[in-house]
Amino acid sequence: MNRTALAALVIAAVLFWPRRSAAETDQATGDTGPIQPQARNNPDAVPSDYPDEYFPVDRVRAMSYAVDVNAFLYMIRSSEHRFPTDVVNGACYQIFYGGKRFNDLSDHPVITGELAPVPLPDHMCRAAGLNPPCFTTAAGGYQFIRPTWQRLRDRLGLEDFSPASQDAAAVELLREVGALDLIEQGDIEGAMKKASKAWASLPGSLAQQNPRAPQFAFARFAEGQRLFA
């Protein structure tokens, strides 16, 4: 193949590659899960000035999963939220889109009625592949929108929106997108690419929502390996 033909193929791939703006989007309800606004302004530099005691690792919950799975979950939470502020203390499990906090963990905060869906600007709707108006119900450590949470909750028989239940749902979502097997095989880069279909904050996402830099994600994963070893 000559260079001209090769260049044409590359251009075609760029122009016609499927775009995915918000990782978790429900076309039926107009619900989408864009990255937390506060995460956009969070630098990717690896912080070096916080002590180990800032990491209250829940060993009982962590025992349910292999070290690398726990590390990957930690990496997702770190990418979806302000790091380290809302991650190392576990606050992210009770954060709604835009930084709002919720207290009722009996179910997703929109289902309990504690919080309401947040309308999004038209340009964010279009970027998510939705016709305006649209909204988001992204909540918790993994920023689950309501339809995604309901699907995973019902499949797994989860009884609440506790951190343990959120972790379990996130692992199931990793399984759905084909990332869990790769994590267990040690292919973390491949797992990140798969998981970016569900979380637009991860490297490799086509969501065009300012995903984290690879070095940030890999640093958080390595940190998680140490924390959950």
Image: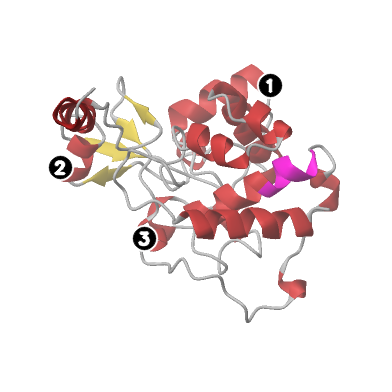
Residue 103 appears in the figure: no
Earlier residue among tags 3 and 1: 3
* Residue receiving disc 2: 122
Kind of residue indicated by mark 2: Asp
Residue 204 tag number: none
User: Which mark lies nearer to you, 3 or 1?
Assistant: 3
Q: Are marks 2 and 3 in contact (CB under 8 Å)?
A: no
Residue 35, image x, y percentages: 38, 49
Q: Nearer the viewer, residue 74 or 8?
A: 8
Q: Nearer the viewer, residue 25 or 205?
A: 205
**How many neighbours does mark 2 have within 10 angstroms: few (below 14), some (14-19), or many (20 or more)?**
some
How far separated are the C-alphas under marks 3 and 1?
34 Å
| In the image: residue 214, left or right of residue 123 | right
How far separated are the C-alphas under marks 2 and 3?
19 Å
| Colour scheme | secondary structure
User: Which mark lies nearer to you, 2 or 3?
Assistant: 3
Label 2 element class: helix
The magenta span reads: 66-71
Q: Residue at x 54, y 54 (%)?
A: 217
* Residue receiving disc 1: 157
**How many neighbours does mark 3 have within 10 angstroms: few (below 14), some (14-19), or many (20 or more)?**
some
Quadrant in which residue 204 is drawn: top left
In the rendered view, would you say 35 is above or below 127? below
Q: Residue at x 56, y 64 (%)?
A: 86
Q: Residue at x 56, y 41 (%)?
A: 189
| In the image: residue 208, left or right of residue 93 | left
Kind of residue indicated by mark 3: Arg
* Residue receiving disc 3: 40
